[in-house]
Image (cartoon, rainbow, N blue to C red):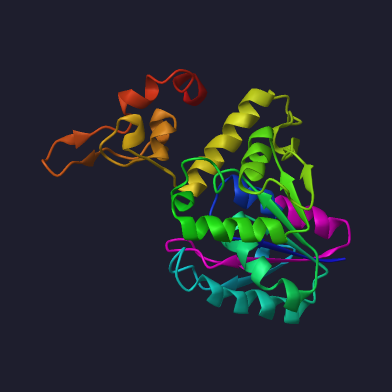
Amino acid sequence: MRICLYTETALPKMGGQEFVVDALARQFTSLGHKVVVLAPRPRPPWRIDDAKFPYRVERHPRFISTRRLVKWYSFWLRRCHRRHRFDVLHCHGVYPPGYLAALCRNSLGVPTVITSHGGDIREGNVRLSRPVLVQRYVQGLEAADALIAISRFTRESLLRLCPNPQAIVDIPNGVDLAPFAPEADGRSVKWTWRRQLRKVALSSHLWIHEAIGIRERTSVHAFLPLAQRPRARSRKDGSRLGPVPATILSKPGIKPLFR
């Protein structure tokens, strides 16, 4: 079977949705299916290296607006279908991917599945405060042949927007336990887990913002052991900014994980 996974965000950006799409594409490929992932180009400083993946990746320009000119991106979805002739379109995200799938439904002529990862349909999402975007959300959901709910929360949110979908199926996201299994030298799962977490933190270059009470953007490198931490940086007023903000280490469960 030829499968297209259309997502509004994908590797090399790092996050839950990106990892899920990558895991699905790898799993489908290992089962003998032909997979193509369609995604926007990431913003700098992320660099594309799609050749390293065991599946095909097609890119289109980034969305310049979530309201205007969105229909224009249907060209890239139709072009992807002409190139790969996929049998199923699996959209990760209701808007814009699910909405664009609805616009191309007649021209593509393939079943459409939408998986929401929660953030796009949660109450309080800024997009859902705009009536024109709510209409597009509903249009995408109603046109889909099936909706996938990864949790009870996403099921309730999907039904709030689309009370009568054609079908809704509960498929929770899974976790690959292999990276967290004990290693041959006898080290415990705990230490393997810590190493994997640090590896993700370093490569993703995440930042901690004012939401947790820090004025400066502090790199996750601060969580590394003392000998591996970067040198302290200077504030604009000349004072020194230490590598380990006390407000972080005081959070319950944080300090023991990174000792």
104 sits left or right of 255 in the view? right
**Residue 111: horizontal and vertical position, in percent?**
80, 64
Front residue of 242/97: it is 97
90 sits left or right of 250 in the view? right
Disc count in the image?
0
Q: Is residue 195 above or below residue 29?
A: above
The reply to whether residue 228 is visible in this rendering is yes
54 sits left or right of 234 in the view? right
Identified at 62% across, 46% down, the residue is 117
**Residue 54: horizontal and vertical position, in percent?**
74, 63
The quadrant of the rendering that contains the N terminus is bottom right
Identified at 70% across, 55% down, the residue is 114
**Residue 61: horizontal and vertical position, in percent?**
51, 73
Residue 36 inside the magenta-drawn segment:
yes
Q: Is residue 111 above or below residue 120?
A: below
Residue 77 inside the magenta-drawn segment:
no
190 sits left or right of 111 in the view? left
Q: Is residue 74 above or below residue 259?
A: below
Magenta residues, as a range? 23-51
The reply to whether residue 10 is visible in this rendering is no
Front residue of 78/83: it is 78
Q: Is residue 242 above or below residue 98?
A: above
Residue occupying the far left of the picture: 237
**Residue 58: horizontal and vertical position, in percent?**
64, 72
